Amino acid sequence: MKSKAWLYARFSSSQQADGDSINRQVKAAQQWCGANGVELQQTSFRDLGVSGWKSIKRPMFEQLIKAMEEGKIPRGSYVLFESTDRLSRRGWEHTRELIKQITVQHGCNLVILDKNQIYTKANVNDVVQNILLMFSADLAEKESQRKSDLVAAAYKSKRQKGDVSRWPFWLDKVDDKFVFNEKAEIIKLIVDLRLQGVGALGIAAELNRRGFKSSRGSNWGHTSVRIAIENSALYGTKDFFTTKSKKAFDDNGNEVRTSNSELVSSISGAFPAVCDFETWQKIQINGEKPGRKSNGTAFHNMIFCSCSAAMSIQIGSGGEKYRKCSRSKVGACNQKMIRNFDQTLVECLGRITYKSISNQIVSKLPELTERLAKLEKVKEMLVEAGDVDSLKEAYQDITSVKMQIADESKIVTLPTTVIKEVFQLSIDEQRLVLRQLISEVIVDRTANLCKINVKLTNGHKKVFGVNVGTGKKSGNNVIVFESDTEKFLNEIKKLNED
């Protein structure tokens, strides 16, 4: 009775789908089986358009391993691969582990067709076989790295030349210049509605009510609205991202590959701007969960326990609202919940007049802008030199400086604001304004005394002492003292003047 063989075939790119990659692999398997008296099975395992380099998830390869585990591919059978790189492109050690899994663990024979190499349980540790495998696997990994580097280099070259191949739906490219098209009224309406405090769901509903279609010709949803709002093209900037995969390790210590997008370059003035940068900052919806309506509080994602965990809202049996440390729910924090906390916080904040510090300190914007320009020049030199390791650090520095510029711009341009007046606005409008004025609120309750530490974006802090009502007076919280760094600094200044 003839031994049986199964073929694993794979190609990684869509361009190969139209060629003879699969036919070539099948033909090689047929020739080997015919020469060795082995019966090639009709069933084969094929991962089409799946890379052996970037992707650790190869569905049909996993099905192949599962078939061996379940005995559907009997021990002593042959498993065929056209070449070492069809098995893996992730280096010698990973390739050898896969071969040992197939031969030692599952008792099958693994064949590399182009080298006519047969690995079995008996020879898997053979020195000569392993040297041949080492060279093949190492070459496969280096070839994949070379292709990856070529693609990355081509992409970098396009970024350096300002070659923008993709642009937002509200723009058209005419004679190498970008101009607003007829859909510009849609994005302008989105910005106007957002400035009025309308959330993503409300904006989508209004766009659909007016009969506007999304860039794909379908109805608007909250996700497409959020994507449009987050686009830096609104203030004229083109951001370039990279999704080059990286090695990482899961909780079990197994190697995985991640492909998270990272900002690597920006071109300011690439597009005509719909709004300025300050306006773009104001309309962001950071922290709001898509698909959910306002929960009735303006302090979403702003209030934290002294243990650093979030203070979430909890509804009592009678409908009363409490703030409770999220860690206390699992016994990791002993801070007690506080009834009517949000109402108390509104009373505390109502005593604060936010003053911009733009007239009190020298703006760091010129220094930061100059530093960003220098970093961009350094980045260009590193790209030309091909210094990948230093480039990574340069990109991180550039991103950090951009964040500092954004924070500095926000502080410098904010006007003096009486926070009490903010609470006359809608909930969404309150969130927009408070997010600009307050960094965070830290709550620290000991017995019946609660300290509320309000950190403002102008660098000052305001601390309120609140007597928390208990028993029959539960929810009846009373402010018993307050202090702030601004008053303290003013008093020190007066003492020095005297």
Image (spheres, rainbow, N blue to C red):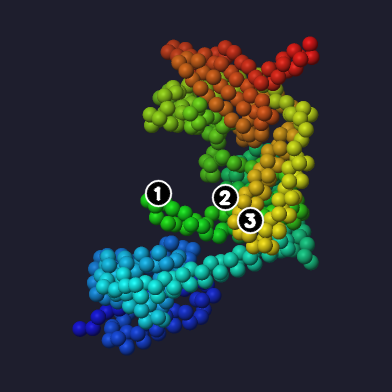
* For marks 1 and 2 on the same chain, the one whose residue lies earlier in the sequence: 2
Residue appearing at x 70%, y 25% in the figure: 354
Is 216 positioned to the left or the right of 305 in the image? right
Q: Is residue 86 above or below residue 285?
A: below
**Residue at image point 52% right, 71% down:** 143
Q: Which residue is mark 3?
A: 391
C-alpha separation, residue under disc 1 versus residue under disc 2: 31 Å
Amino acid type of disc 2? Thr
Asked if disc 3 and disc 1 are in contact, CB closer than 8 Å, the reply is no
How far is disc 3 from disc 1 in space, using C-alphas? 29 Å
- Name which quarter of the figure residue 106 lies in: bottom left
Query: First in sequence: mark 3 or mark 2?
Result: 2
In percent of the image, x 38 and y 29: which residue is there? Answer: 331
**x and y percent of residue 151 in the render?**
60, 67
* Quadrant, the N terminus: bottom left
Q: What residue is disc 1 on?
A: 251
Front: mark 3 or 1: 3
Instruction: Left or right? Give the position of 267 relative to 21.
Output: right
- Horizontal and vertical percent position of residue 374: 74, 50
| Residue 192 seen in render | no
> Which comes sooner in the sequence, label 3 or label 1?
1
Reading the image, the residue beneath label 2 is 223
Looking at the rendered image, the disc whose residue lies closer to the viewer, 3 or 2, is 3
Task: Judge the density around disc 3: few (<14), some (14-19), many (≥20) Cα neighbours within 10 Å.
Answer: some
Residue displayed at 50% across by 26% down? 306
